[in-house]
Image (cartoon, rainbow, N blue to C red):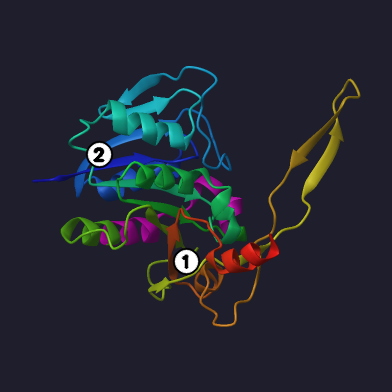
Amino acid sequence: MKKNILITNDDGFDALGLKALIEALRPLANLIVVAPSLNKSACAHSMTLSRPLKFKSVDDDFYRLVDGTPTDCIFLGLHNLYDESNLPDLVVSGINIGSNMGEDITYSGTVAGAMEAVLQGVPAISVSQVLDSKAKEIGDLWDYELAKKSIFDIVSKILEDKFPLDQRKLLNINIPPCSIKECNGIKITKAGHRIYGNDCHRYHDPKGSEFHWIGLHPLLWEQSKEKNCDFEAIKDNYISITPVQLDMTSYSDIEQLNKWI
């Protein structure tokens, strides 16, 4: 019997990365897709509480959630499109156009879709395609073949065996910007330390009013001593798989804080 997978993303229901993910997973499972109607990149784990949300049918078992976030898509998808006693076997969020590594995990709507799934008791993975300068120039012509093959293989392993992590933990996967032949394999990584700049631009509209536009930071990071972080794996043309837990407690500081207080 075919398994069931719920899919979302944060680039919007018409994103090519989402189309590639659907193509990769369709042979493996029964798919239901619930994706935002608009691009919701960097919306993090936000949930819409101030207005009603509507499902709009795009195709069979494919819905766009009008002005919803990835978190909304998963929360409403799980509780409205599935029987509570028969939730999907897996949630897959992606394929994001661009990386989600290091502290960017906290900004990512893609990762947030997977976060919401594991909070609801469903195993989940998030998938992002890292882009190089050439890929950014060609835009929609980007080749997702490595991403599709990788996700097919990883999801096959999960469905045939079991999800490898405990409750409230997810797999964050980043695909290097290279061909299948150039890929060196898979590395299990930690989230690296990204270096952030100040890419904020100030402009004036025709009426003289000032406005600001936040740009994209260059992909820079602090090298780890063991060279085992997600950034370094991608640099060396490895697929990066990082286990992520939702418990962000800094346990090593509890004793120190008890003394301090």
Place residue 250 in its image quadrant: bottom right
Which label is found at residue 219?
none
Instruction: Specify start and end residues of the magenta stretch as a single range.
Output: 134-153
Q: Residue at x 13, y 45 (%)?
A: 2
- Amino acid residing under circle 2: Leu
Q: Could you tell me if residue 13 is visible in this image?
A: no
Mark 2 in CB contact with mark 1 (< 8 angstroms): no
- The residue lying furthest to the bottom in this view is 226
Determine the CA span between mark 2 and mark 1: 28 Å
Q: Nearer the viewer, residue 43 or 245?
A: 245
- The residue lying furthest to the right in this view is 208
Reply above or below: 28 against 74.
below
Could you tell me which secondary element the residue under label 2 belongs to?
A: strand
Where's the C terminus, which quadrant? Answer: bottom right
- Amino acid residing under circle 1: Cys
Residue 38 percent across, percent down from the top left: 52, 30
- Image check: 146 left or right of 190? left
Q: Residue at x 30, y 46 (%)?
A: 122
Q: Nearer the viewer, residue 13 or 242?
A: 242
Q: Residue at x 46, y 71 (%)?
A: 189
Q: Could you tell me if residue 105 is visible in this image?
A: yes
Q: Nearer the viewer, residue 39 or 68?
A: 68
Residue 156 percent across, percent down from the top left: 22, 58
Residue 121 percent across, percent down from the top left: 30, 45
- Magenta segment, prevailing SS (helix, strand or loop): helix
Q: Earlier in the sequence, mark 2 or mark 1?
A: 2
Report the residue marked by disc 1: 178
- Neighbour class for label 1 at 10 Å: few (<14), some, many (≥20)? many
- The residue lying furthest to the left in this view is 1
Could you tell me which secondary element the residue under label 1 belongs to?
A: loop
Which label is found at residue 31?
2
